[in-house]
Amino acid sequence: MIEVSPLAEAFRPFWLGGLNDVSGHQRKELKGWINDENFQVYEAPTESSFILNVAEPLPVLQAYAAEISRISIASVESMASILATPPSKKSVAWLIIQTYYAAFFAAHTITRTLGTSCLPLEPIQLRSVTKISTLFGQRPTSPIGGGLYKVVFDPANGKVQCSQIKSMKAGPHEAFWKLFCERIDDVAAKLLELPALTAKTAQGASSKLSEISSNLRFNNSALASWLSSVRNRVNYDHIWATWYPYFQRQVYYDELVRHVDDWQLDPMEIDLVSHQGKDLRRFQATCNVIIALSQNFAEDMAKRCTVGKSFHEFGSLAFRRLLRQSI
């Protein structure tokens, strides 16, 4: 079990209320919860947004927990399957691609822990929303559109706010990274206003989040999707000499293999700024800090479950125990 980072501790006030007390192995995610139709609709849905009202927050919290568990396992398993000694010692393409997906999954768990899920809603869910809204005399003003949605849960008010992400035209990965970066920026600013944190802790955590945000926007990435652009160029364009025959390969690429396991470090200790001229190291470090923060969230929240065994114990923490047993 890792020691929880001060950065993860600083996030506690921003946790989705009540999520830390969800226990047991959760399997039903938000799509399944919507399909169950155990909600009310008091405002007519529009083509791109609707609000679902709930009297009992626990089933929604359990749905968030189920998504976090599934996605966090995918993140850790992606890192665990990276070949530290590839068949060709110069090959780093799959290291880059797998590290990207691990960070992408980890970032999804972070936003969900903070109360925001980003997921595609399909016709079956939209039919359920339309059905219940009509039963409550709130027929949609126009057919609800499908696609990628930002789903924000406010347990205190019993509201699940669903908003279609218009930037879907830029691609689901780009749309998500923009959402993630905006959330990181928001927390970075609010940390400085929290009376519960010492000035040193707040400033240190806020500064680290600003470094993450800066790297997400590196190289003038307007949508904060620099990580996605690197993945795309390695995966589809085969640049940076990461694939055979490795023409113009950089010497610093050898560092990438040595830093594969940095995601197990305290995220505050991962250097995000000293990578001038080493874009792939900047990429890797940024991914690793996001994964590390996600795992710190799991460790920290699991310790603070007051009712039974935390849902995190059935997610990435369970997979990490499995990894340790196999060593």
Image (cartoon, helix red, strand yellow):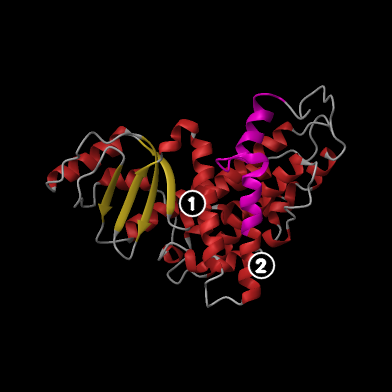
51, above or below 313, in the image: above
Q: Circle 1 — which element?
A: helix
Q: Circle 2 — which element?
A: helix
In this view, the residue in front, 127 or 247, is: 247
* Amino acid under disc 1: Ile
Q: Residue 124: x percent and y percent?
A: 29, 35
Which residue is under mark 1? 68
**Mark 1 or 2: the one toward you:** 2
The quarter of the picture where the N terminus appears is bottom right
Which residue is under mark 2? 204
**First in sequence: mark 1 or mark 2?**
1
Q: Is residue 226 magenta?
A: yes
What label does residue 320 carry, if any?
none
Q: Is residue 72 visible?
A: no
Q: Which residue is rendered at x = 39% and y = 56% of the image? A: 62
Q: Main secondary structure of the magenta part?
A: helix
Horizontally, residue 97 falls left or right of residue 11, namely right
Region in magenta: 209-238
Distance between mark 1 and mark 2 Cα atoms: 26 Å
Q: Residue 249: x percent and y percent?
A: 84, 30
Q: Residue 216: x percent and y percent?
A: 62, 46
Q: Is residue 249 magenta?
A: no
Q: Which residue is rendered at x = 34% and y = 55% of the image? A: 60
Horizontally, residue 275 falls left or right of residue 17, namely right
